[in-house]
Image (cartoon, rainbow, N blue to C red):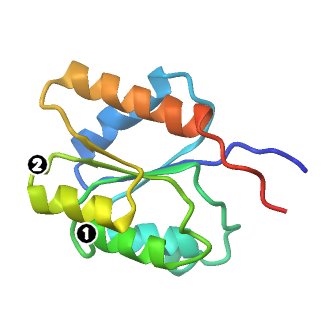
Amino acid sequence: MTRYLRPILLVEDSLADAELAIDALKDANLANPIVHLEDGVDCLDYLYGQGVFSGQERVEPAVVLLDIKMPRMNGLDVLTRMRADERLRQVPVVILSSSREESDLARSWDLGVNAYVIKPVDVDQFFDAVRTLGQFWAVLNQRPDKD
């Protein structure tokens, strides 16, 4: 079976946070392509190969880094849809959010998130957190190949 590097899917509506996350992932020397989307609707369109992504080859991401508070569809609704779908259920999802609300944390874990990382306010801490996430989920944590 041919192995290829699956993309890291970053779903973040804040362009400043997205740029920081992309820089941190690149700084980690990951070879995985990074796909940045700005809301939950675009995320699901990408995952299902529909909307602006129809006709493109559907590639399952290595990990989805998902913000919670986004326009059109929030991250928890995306996570709910992913965990309800047999094809997407096993895709690792890491919530990367500034939300410290207990309800967001509890609901994320109840929905089956793989990790919940609160975005540090400090830029260096944010950079370190994203770099570590990328290295673990894209390199170290390997799922078995599908037949």
Q: Which mark is residue 100?
A: 2
Task: Name which residue lies at 47% across and 34% down.
Answer: 134
> Crowdedness of circle 2 by 10 Å Cα count: few (<14), some, many (20+)?
few
- Mark 2 in CB contact with mark 1 (< 8 angstroms): no
Task: Name which residue lies at 60% across and 32% down.
Answer: 140
The residue under label 1 is: 74
Dot placed on the residue nearer the N-terminal end, 2 or 1? 1
**Camera-nearest label, 2 or 1:** 2
Q: Nearer the viewer, residue 89 or 30?
A: 89
| Residue 69 shows up from this direction | no
Q: Is residue 71 left or right of residue 49?
A: left
Determine whether the residue tagged by mark 1 lies in a helix, strand or loop. Answer: loop
What is the quadrant of residue 54 in the picture? Answer: bottom right
Q: Is residue 10 above or below residue 119?
A: below
Identity of the amino acid at label 2? Arg
Q: Nearer the viewer, residue 129 or 23?
A: 129
Q: Is residue 63 left or right of residue 112?
A: right
Position of residue 30 measured from the top left corner of the image (x, y, whole percent): 57, 29
Task: Name which residue lies at 55% across and 22% down.
Answer: 29
Q: Is residue 18 left or right of residue 62?
A: left
The alpha-carbon separation of the residues under discs 2 and 1 comes to 15 Å
Identity of the amino acid at label 1? Asn
| Residue 4 shows up from this direction | yes
Position of residue 47 measured from the top left corner of the image (x, y, whole percent): 54, 69
Determine whether the residue tagged by mark 2 lies in a helix, strand or loop. Answer: loop
Q: Which mark is residue 97?
A: none
Position of residue 117 measured from the top left corner of the image (x, y, whole percent): 27, 41
Position of residue 78 measured from the top left corner of the image (x, y, whole percent): 37, 71
Quadrant location of the C terminus?
bottom right
> Crowdedness of circle 1 by 10 Å Cα count: few (<14), some, many (20+)?
some
